[in-house]
Image (tube, rainbow, N blue to C red):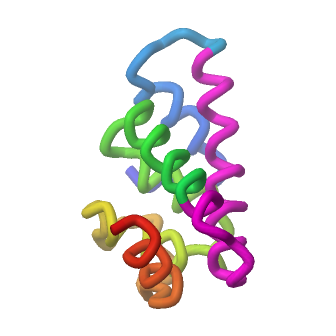
Amino acid sequence: MVITKENWLVVAVKSYENPNMEEIQDDLQNFPLFVRGVNKIKSGKANKKYIRTTTNRFIMLTNSFGSIAPRLILSFSPEKSHPSINAFLKYFGYYAVYPETKDKRIDKFVLKCLEEELE
């Protein structure tokens, strides 16, 4: 099944590790915050603390939504953010060509920022 902007929320709720609705709502807020963080890193305006915060949001999403989290992130986010998100997926070993991947490129600047700041 391809995850789309129309069905991603249903898929997210069904794949959630802990079916407490209040916790799901809190964790769903991490999707736009993660995408915003990725875009700030891409712009070159993120410091080390911001990169770590964005990384923590990614880890929280994968912990909460399991292996489907990368597909949810890609389906939720604008296509112009996909190369930068792909850099996160590659760094954390989640990169694959998912049906939701519109742009298969990996943003080398974002990947370099992750490698320098997190190693």
Question: Residue 118 placed where, x, y %?
Answer: 40, 65
Locate residue 18, reporting x and y percent. 43, 15
Q: Is residue 111 above or below residue 64?
A: below
Image: magenta residue range: 23-51
Q: Is residue 32 left or right of residue 62?
A: right
- Which of the 4 image quadrants contains residue 30? top right
Q: Where is residue 88 drawn, in percent x and y?
A: 43, 67
Q: Is residue 26 above or below residue 57?
A: above
> Magenta part mainly helix, strand or loop?
helix
Residue depicted at 44% across the width and 88% down the height: 105
Asked if residue 83 is among those painted magenta in the image, a careful observer would answer no
- Residue 40 image offset from top left, x and y in percent: 71, 71
- Does residue 36 lie above or below 28 as drawn? below
Q: Is residue 71 visible?
A: yes
Residue located at (40% from left, 42% from top): 62
With 37 as the anchor, is 58 left or right in this view? left
Q: Visible in this render: residue 86?
A: no
The part of the image, by quadrant, that contains residue 29 is top right
Which quadrant holds residue 45? Answer: bottom right
Left or right for 6, reference 20: right
Identify the residue at horizontal 52%, vertical 27% (top origin): 13
Residue 24 highlighted magenta (yes or no): yes
Considering depth in this image, is 113 or 104 the residue closer to the camera? 113
Residue positioned 51% across, 88% down in the render: 109
Question: Which of the two residues, 10 or 94, is positioned nearer the viewer here?
Answer: 94
Q: Is residue 111 above or below residue 49?
A: below
The quarter of the rendered structure image containing the C terminus is: bottom left
